[in-house]
Amino acid sequence: MKIKIKEFANKKGISLYKLAQIMNLPQPTIYSWAKGRTQPSYLNFDKLCDVLNCKIEDLLESEPVQNKLF
């Protein structure tokens, strides 16, 4: 699941690099979340929402549901 970190950070005028500094996390961690390679922990999701002033559900990008064949 991809997280819309970059979109929300851009709205706040914060680069991903600056976001990593604010959250006191390594820059590759933030980039990995933004690319959808890894997911933040619940604690980091809370911190991320506090920094970006949004809700968790705002950050989550819905993925299209594929039709299943029966």
Image (cartoon, rainbow, N blue to C red):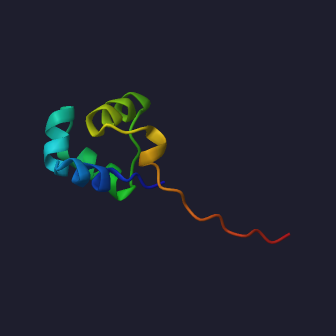
Quadrant in which residue 20 is drawn: top left
Q: Position of residue 21 (x, y in %)?
A: 14, 38
Front residue of 20/51: it is 51
The relative height of residue 44 versus residue 9 in the rendered view (above or below) is above
Residue 42's spot in the image, x, y percent?
A: 43, 31
Relative vertical location of residue 25 with respect to residue 14 in this rendering, above or below:
above
Q: Please give the name of the residue rendered at 16% of the width and 35% of the height, measured from the top-left corner.
A: 22
Name the residue at 39% across, 48% down: 38
Q: Is residue 65 above or below residue 30?
A: below
Number of numbered discs on residues? 0
**Residue 52 placement, left or right of 17:** right
Q: Residue furthest right?
A: 70
Residue 4 location (% of width, % of height): 37, 53
Residue 24 horizontal side relative to residue 51, left or right: left
Give the residue displayed 38% in from the left and 30% down from the top: 46
Residue depicted at x 41% and y 44%: 39
Q: Nearer the viewer, residue 31 or 48?
A: 48
Q: Position of residue 6 (x, y in %)?
A: 28, 55
